[in-house]
Every structure is written in C-alpha cells, then in structure tokens.
Image (spheres, rainbow, N blue to C red):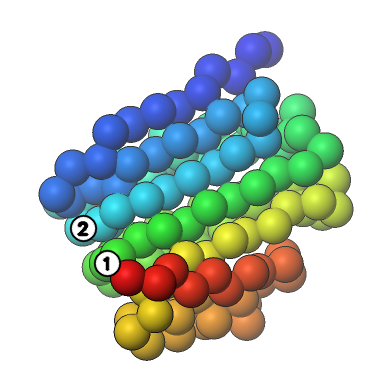
Amino acid sequence: MDLQPIKLAGSPKTPAVNFDPDKGVVELKGRSIPENAIDFYRPLIDWLDKYATTAKTNTEVNIQLEYFNTSSSKCILDVFKKLETVYRVTNSVIINWYYEEDDEDMLEAGEDYQSILKIPFKMIEIEE
C-alpha cells in the first residue's frame, strides 16, 4: 500500500505538519493547542503505524514547537513511541528538537522526552 504524505498548514491552535514517506521526514512546527488533541494527532499516529512497515533507511524528525498544552504533550509522546518502533526496525531515526535560546520550558520538555525514549535526540537552539 502506498503511503501518502500528510501536509497540513499550521493554524493558531495546530502545528504545521509535514510527514513525507518518500523523504523519511516527519515535521511538526508551530503551536499545538488543538480543541481535541487526540482527534488532531490520531491520523498522524495511524500514519506512523503504516510508515513503520515501510520506513526509509533514515528518518529525520524535526519538532519545532513554540508552545504545546498538556493534552498535546501526551499525543506527542505517542508520536515518539511510534517513532521508537521505526527506530527498532531501521536503527536510524533522529529527533531534532528545536527550541528558542531563552525558552527553558521547551528545552526541558525536549529533555523530558529524551529521558523517556530510546531514540537519539538532538537539542538545537534557535537564535532569535
């Protein structure tokens, strides 16, 4: 089965999404405070389930969120758990966690995920 890319424009409440199976790219960018985080993230998590069976040799994950709420944080963890499955299969997933230089909260959030997961994380500071 051919896996279609998911491309969603960001909104004030939801992040821009770029999941590209051909390039092995998974990106979330912006704010994540959807009315219903589970409804927003479920198709992404389902997509990653399918992607895990046909994953590229290298999967690059770019997470550049300026803010996310508690319900999003749980869903983001679910996304990462699916990526952990991909990592177990291909052994080549890198998560690039972007945060602004003065945003301690976002850095800590990335470090929290890093401590839970068994995937290489790269903390990348964005200079303003």
Q: Residue 33 carries which label?
A: 2
In the picture, the quarter occupied by the N terminus is top right
Residue at 40% x, 28% y is 7
Given residues 26 and 38, the one toward you in this image is: 26
- Above or below 70: residue 62: above
Q: Is residue 62 left or right of residue 109?
A: right
Q: Residue 30: where, in percent of width, then height? A: 30, 53
Given residues 122 and 119, the one toward you in this image is: 122
Residue at 30% x, 65% y is 66
- Residue 36 visible from this viewpoint: no
Pair 2/1: label in front: 1
- Above or below 34: residue 98: below
What is the crowding at mark 1: few (fewer than 14 residues within 10 Å), some, or many (at least 20)?
Answer: some
Q: Is residue 121 left or right of residue 35?
A: right
Query: Contact, CB < 8 Å: mark 2 with mark 1?
Result: yes
As drawn, the residue found furthest toward the top would be: 1
Q: Quadrant of residue 8?
A: top left
Q: Marks 2 and 1, Cα distance to the nearest angstrom?
A: 8 Å
Q: Residue 49: where, in percent of width, then height? A: 62, 38
Residue at 55% x, 42% y is 26
Amino acid type for the residue under numbered disc 2: Ile
As drawn, the residue found furthest toward the front would be: 128
Amino acid type for the residue under numbered disc 1: Tyr
Residue at 25% x, 41% y is 10
User: What secondary structure is marked by label 2?
Assistant: loop
In the picture, the quarter occupied by the C terminus is bottom left
Q: Residue 11: where, in percent of width, then height? A: 18, 42
Residue named by callout 1: 67
